[in-house]
Image (cartoon, rainbow, N blue to C red):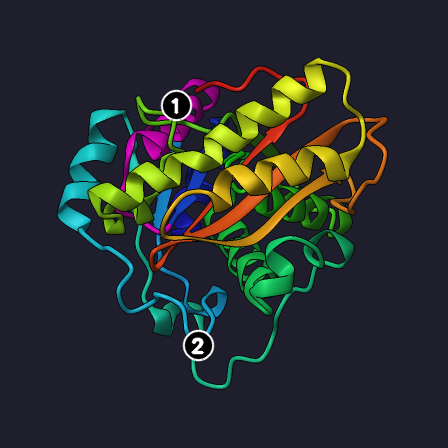
Amino acid sequence: MQSHSENIRLSGKKVSFVPTMGYFHEGHLSLMREARRLADEVIVSIYVNPTQFGPKEDFSKYPRDFERDAQMAGSVGVDVIFCPSNEDMYPAGYQTYVEVGQVTKNLCGVSRPGHFRGVATVCCKLFNIVKPHCAVFGKKDFQQLAAIRRMVTDLNLDLEIVGMPTFREPDGLAMSSRNVYLSPEERVSGLTLVGALKLAQKLYAAGERKADVIIGQAQRLIAGAPFTDIDYVKICDTATLEDVVDIQGEVVMALAVKVGKTRLIDNSVLGEELRA
């Protein structure tokens, strides 16, 4: 992989990269289309990274279908799929990890200790292996995007990070490989996440600037549906991801909710159009 990318770069062409854990959906394909627009060579990785899963999370059950993914990637012009093994990525004696500080402490960092260490480490390794000029990420995981941008800046990595809007299903549910776990009844309850974001946008547009007021109404909407167990509903500064009390600058409302056994996340920057 390194040799291939180096040859592409030496030929004067631009390399774009989309890191994934596979089991593609239209959200992934939208990132690949943007990567195709940005560069001459599009590389996609498929790697279910064990170091970002907690001991009680769904690593072994995470959906996988390489042949399906390869066909879908080819349909949008992907040139190369990089699909390393665990032995490639974490050989015997492995002991080096990347820690990103403050932006990983809140939100998912509270309930998923070690998650962002795994994300930052694998992305840093993938960037060094694939050698892209730019990498494309979705904004659905706002905290992940913020952490990767912080790491790239702090470590002087020579690439551009491109963030793309959350891709949604026709009913508004944020696209995720985990959506396949939802029963029809749970899916209806899952729509309370985007409903809560719409409510927050409506309150913000009407002039509400107290974070606890907006959060309280959003929580009530979600908790009123069956199968829901709220991990967090927060309003944070988009740069630091620290909680805000009075909304002044740019903020993001971020949600994590277990619907049945499936953990869903979603977010929206207040004041921006919610595409749902």
- Which residue, given by chain and number where applicable, does mark 1 sit on? 36
**What is the quadrant of the C terminus in the image?**
top left
- Which residue, given by chain and number where applicable, does mark 2 sit on? 55
Amino acid at pointer 1: Arg
Give the farthest residue toward the bottom: 93
The stretch of residues the image draws in magenta is 21-41
Looking at the picture, does residue 212 appear above or below residue 263?
above
Looking at the picture, does residue 128 appear above or below residue 80?
below
Residue 170 place in picture, x, y as percent: 30, 21
Inspect the magenta stretch and tell me whether residue 25 lies in it: yes
Residue depicted at x 49% and y 64%: 52
Q: Is residue 262 visible in this depiction of the protein?
A: yes
Inspect the magenta stretch and tell me whether residue 35 lies in it: yes
Residue depicted at x 30% and y 29%: 26
CA neighbours of label 2 inside 10 A, class few (<14), some (14 to 19), many (20+): few
Q: Is residue 43 visible in this depiction of the protein?
A: no
Residue 45 or residue 258, whichever sits in front = 258
Residue depicted at x 64% and y 63%: 110
